[in-house]
C-alpha cells in the first residue's frame, strides 16, 4: 500500500502542487475506506473540460499502441500456430490435442515482445481424465513424460532446447507444465478438469474482442496501468490478466455505468456462442476460427477510449470491493450475502459459481490502486502518461495489510 497520512490526502485535493513525498509519514497508515465519500469526481464537467486535451492525447496513444501491437501479433500468429502443431504432433495421440488459450487466441497481449504460449491439453478419453485426477503418481508420471517429449524436440531444433529444467505443478488447481526455451520463448501446458474453464473463458474474451474495438484498447491501457503499480501480478497473489479483462468487460457491458453500453451481455444476446452448455468440441472450433464475428451488435455509445478510461477509474474508485458481486453473465452487480472486511473480490464469470479472484490480497491492492490513480488524475497526472506511467513509482502496496486487517476498519 502506498505510504501516506490521512491529512495528506485532504491537503492534496486542495493543492495541485503537492506531491506524495511532501507529507510522507512512515509511521502512519492510510486506510482508503476511512476517506469520506463522495469526493471530487473525474467525470465532473469542469474536470473534463480542463483536461480535454490530455484525454484526447490518451485516446491517440492507446489507439496507436493497439495498432502496433495488433500488427506485430498478426505477424507472429502463423508462426506460433505452426509451432503448436509441431508440439502437438510430438506429444499427443490421436485421442488428444493441444488447444491454444489466452492472449494467443484473443489477441489481448500487452507485451509486444512476449514469446509466451499457453496451451490446454484436451483428451476425449474419459478413463484417462478420471485416472489423471484420481491418481497423483500417474499425474506426475504423465506430466514428466510430456516434458521429456518436449525436450527431445531440442535435439532437432536448437531454438527449442530447454534453458532450464521444466517445472511441474501437479497439485495446482489446474495442473501445469512450464517450459522455457533458449530462444526466449516460454510454454505452459495446462491439464484442466473436464469443465475446461480456460477454454470457455478464452472463447468468451475472443468474442468480446470481436464485439467492439474499444474493449481491447481499454484493456491494454488498464492492464498496463495496473502493472505499473505492481498490482497486476498473479504469481504474487494479485490481479491476473483474466481478472483485469473481466473488470473491463463489466464496466463496458453494465447499463448502470454506461448507457448505452459499449459491449453486449453475450450470455443474453448471443447465448448460443457462450453458454456453459456448449459442447467443448464447439468451443474449440470457435477458438480456432480466425474469422469470428458478433452478428447483430453495434454499440450506440460514441465515447472515445480516453473518455471511457477516465470513467472507468471513477467507477472503480468508488466500487465497494467488500460488498458487491460482479456477475458477468447478467451484466449486473448485486450485494453479497455475508460481509467481512477480509473477504475476496467477487467476480463471477459465466462458468463458475465462485469468484475467479481467489486471493485475499486482491481487494486491498485494487482499492488502494484505484484511489491512488484517482487522486493523481484529479491533479492532471497519469492521464496522458501511458504507457510509461512514471507517476506509479510513488505507489506502494503493503501485502501485510490484507493479512492483518486493522480491527477498527469499518466499511
Image (cartoon, grey):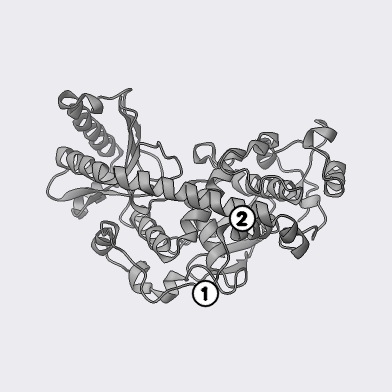
- The residue positioned 46% from the left and 55% from the top of the image is 216
Q: Is residue 113 above or below residue 307?
A: above
Residue 190 appears in the rendering: no
Quadrant placement of the N terminus: top right
Tell me whether the residue at label 2 lies in contact with that at label 1, contact meaning CB atoms closer than 8 angstroms: no
Q: Viewed as shown, does residue 66 lie left or right of 8?
A: left
- Give the SS element for disc 2: helix
Report x, y in % for residue 100.
29, 48
Judging by the rendered image, the residue that carries numbered circle 1 is 300
Query: In terms of image quadrants, where is residue 21?
Result: top right
- The residue positioned 46% from the left and 44% from the top of the image is 110
- The residue positioned 78% from the left and 37% from the top of the image is 20
Disc 2 residue crowd, few under 14, some 14–19, many 20+, Cα 10 Å: some
Q: Is residue 329 above or below residue 100?
A: below
Q: Is residue 178 above or below residue 85?
A: above
Judging by the rendered image, the residue that carries numbered circle 2 is 56
Quadrant placement of the C terminus: bottom right
Residue 225 image label = none
Q: Is residue 242 above or below residue 143?
A: below
Q: Viewed as shown, does residue 129 lie left or right of 102?
A: left
Amino acid at each position: 500500500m502506498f505510504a501516506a497520512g490521512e491529512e495528506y490526502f485532504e491537503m492534496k485535493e486542495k493543492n495541485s502542487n503537492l506531491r506524495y513525498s511532501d507529507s510522507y509519514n512512515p509511521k502512519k497508515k492510510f486506510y482508503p475506506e476511512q476517506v469520506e465519500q463522495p469526493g471530487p469526481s473525474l467525470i465532473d464537467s469542469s474536470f473534463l473540460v480542463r483536461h480535454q486535451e490530455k484525454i484526447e492525447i490518451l485516446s491517440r496513444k492507446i489507439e496507436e499502441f493497439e495498432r502496433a501491437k495488433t500488427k506485430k501479433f498478426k505477424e507472429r500468429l502463423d508462426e506460433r500456430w505452426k509451432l503448436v502443431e509441431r508440439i502437438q504432433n510430438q506429444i499427443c495421440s490421436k485421442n488428444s490435442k493441444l488447444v491454444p488459450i489466452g492472449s494467443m487466441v484473443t489477441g489481448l497481449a500487452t507485451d509486444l515482445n512476449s514469446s509466451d504460449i499457453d496451451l490446454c491439453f484436451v483428451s476425449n478419453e474419459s478413463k484417462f481424465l478420471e485416472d489423471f485426477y484420481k491418481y497423483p503418481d500417474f499425474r506426475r508420471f504423465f506430466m514428466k513424460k510430456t516434458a521429456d517429449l518436449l525436450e527431445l524436440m531440442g535435439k532437432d531444433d536448437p531454438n527449442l532446447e530447454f534453458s532450464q529444467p521444466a517445472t511441474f505443478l501437479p497439485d495446482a488447481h489446474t495442473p501445469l507444465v512450464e517450459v522455457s526455451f533458449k530462444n526466449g520463448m516460454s510454454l505452459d501446458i495446462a491439464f484442466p478438469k473436464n469443465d475446461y474453464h480456460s477454454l470457455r473463458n478464452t472463447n468468451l474474451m475472443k468474442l468480446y474482442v470481436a464485439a467492439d474495438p474499444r474493449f481491447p484498447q481499454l484493456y491494454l491501457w488498464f492492464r498496463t496501468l495496473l502493472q505499473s503499480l505492481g498490482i497486476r501480478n498473479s504469481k504474487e497473489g494479485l490481479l491476473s490478466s483474466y481478472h483485469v479483462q473481466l473488470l473491463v468487460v463489466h464496466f463496458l457491458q453494465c447499463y448502470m455505468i454506461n448507457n448505452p453500453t459499449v459491449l453486449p451481455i453475450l450470455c443474453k444476446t448471443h447465448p448460443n456462442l457462450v453458454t456453459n452448455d456448449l459442447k467443448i468440441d464447439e468451443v474449440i472450433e470457435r477458438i480456432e476460427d480466425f474469422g469470428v464475428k458478433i452478428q447483430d451488435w453495434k454499440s450506440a455509445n460514441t465515447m472515445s477510449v480516453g473518455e471511457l478510461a477516465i470513467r472507468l477509474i471513477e467507477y472503480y474508485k468508488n466500487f465497494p470491493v467488500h460488498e458487491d458481486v460482479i456477475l458477468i453473465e447478467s451484466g449486473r452487480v448485486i450485494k453479497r450475502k455475508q460481509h467481512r472486511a477480509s473477504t475476496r473480490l467477487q467476480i463471477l464469470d459465466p462458468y463458475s459459481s465462485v469468484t475467479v479472484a481467489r486471493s485475499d490480497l486482491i481487494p486491498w491492492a485494487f482499492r488502494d490502486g484505484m484511489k491512488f490513480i484517482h487522486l493523481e488524475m484529479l491533479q492532471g497526472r497519469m492521464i496522458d502518461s501511458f504507457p510509461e506511467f512514471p507517476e506509479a513509482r510513488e505507489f506502494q502496496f503493503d501485502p501485510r495489510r490484507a493479512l492483518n486487517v486493522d480491527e477498527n476498519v469499518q466499511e
